[in-house]
Amino acid sequence: MTVILAAAAILGFGYLLVSAVLRRIPAAPLCLPSDPIPAAWPGIVDANVPLARSLSADERQRLLRLVQLFLSDKHFEGCGGLTVSDEMKVTIAAEACLLLLHLEGPCYPALRTVLVYPRGFVPKIARSPQTGEIPETPAPLIGESWQDGVVVVSWDDVVRGAGNPLDGENVVLHEFAHQLDEEDGAGDGAPVLPGSALRTWGRVLSDEHDRLRRDVDHDRQSVLDEYGATNKAEFFAVATETFFEKPVQLEREHPELYEQLKRFYRQDPARWTPPPPS
Ligand SMILES: [Zn+2]
């Protein structure tokens, strides 16, 4: 028993050490492609990603380069009879890469495949009903992020989420925030951060998550969607949507949370000129 406990303690310590080291390793700089950017892409981004209209010319160029990198590295697959067009790929990649715009890390290193459904989809893995229980029809989902390298989105909801950049709802930003969160191997609301930033991040996110849970319990309005009360991973994903789509309100009502997200993403969307809804 003593040996087992000692082995467990060593493994536990090893895990903590490795995850601590992982959080401290500076990311390798991104090597962006230099091939010509296809002529249609800027128009697709302009039309479908209103948030990008708030970016500077240099940032838009970098976003297109990130899209190039994303599309050269990730596989898209249509589901439910959908054929994935270039417009769909560029739109989804541009929204996803908006999160990476000023990050130095790799481009979603664990992600291999993006599955695209035409509309809300029912997950394939549903809970088996107990004997005698009437099975519930699972509600359709608009997106999912899996830890084994897959993101799933509904195209209808990608269009709806991107088309209104001021409503705080954006399925692509949400699911790719999960991918960033999971880069260190744990979906716990803490993405890869410098060690010095981790403690403050943990405190602020924890306090803000508790605050949202209390707001939900007492039916109080919040700029953060109540789904963020589910757990810390969902809180980070919801906070990311709010940071990019309702930044002024988030900064006013949750200044500490806004500051942490601003430091992590190295972006300050509250200072952007708000894009007009499409
Ligand atoms: Zn989520």
Image: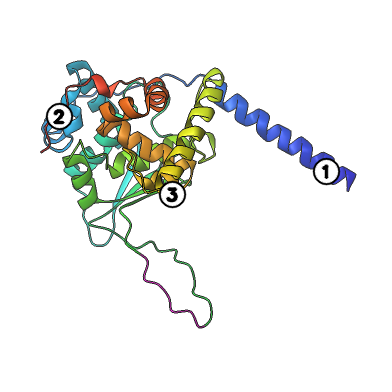
Residue that badge 1 annotates:
5
Under tag 1, what secondary structure?
helix
Sequence-earlier tag: 3 or 2: 3
Rounded to the nearest whole Å, what is the CA distance between mark 3 and mark 2? 33 Å
Residue drawn at point x = 33 percent, y = 40 percent: 222
Name which of mark 3 and mark 1 comes first in the sequence. Answer: 1
Quadrant in which the C terminus is drawn: top left
Q: Secondary structure at mark 2?
A: loop
Cα distance in 3D space between marks 3 and 1? 40 Å
Q: State which tag comes first along the sequence, 2 or 1.
A: 1
Q: Residue at x 25, y 40 (%)?
A: 92
- Which residue shows up at 42% across the image and 37% down it? 236
Residue 133 covered by magenta stretch? yes
Which residue does the numbered mark 2 point to in the structure image? Answer: 275
Q: Nearer the viewer, mark 3 or mark 1?
A: 3
Tell me, yes or no, if residue 56 can be seen here: yes
Kindly report which numbered mark, 3 or 2, lies closer to the viewer in this rendering. Answer: 3
Q: Is residue 94 magenta?
A: no
In which quarter of the view is residue 163 placed?
Answer: top left
Q: Which residue is mark 3?
A: 217
Q: Give the magenta-colored segment's residue range.
A: 132-138
Badge 2: how crowded within 10 Å, few (<14), some, or many (20+)?
A: some
Amino acid of disc 1:
Leu
Where residue 253 sits: x, y (%)? 34, 29
Farthest residue in the bottom direction? 132
| Above or below for 264 versus 89 | above
Q: Nearer the viewer, mark 2 or mark 1?
A: 2
Q: Amino acid at mark 3?
A: Asp
Given the image, on which type of amino acid does mark 2 rest? Pro
Main SS, magenta residues: loop
- Position of 195 with respect to 74 (left or right) is right
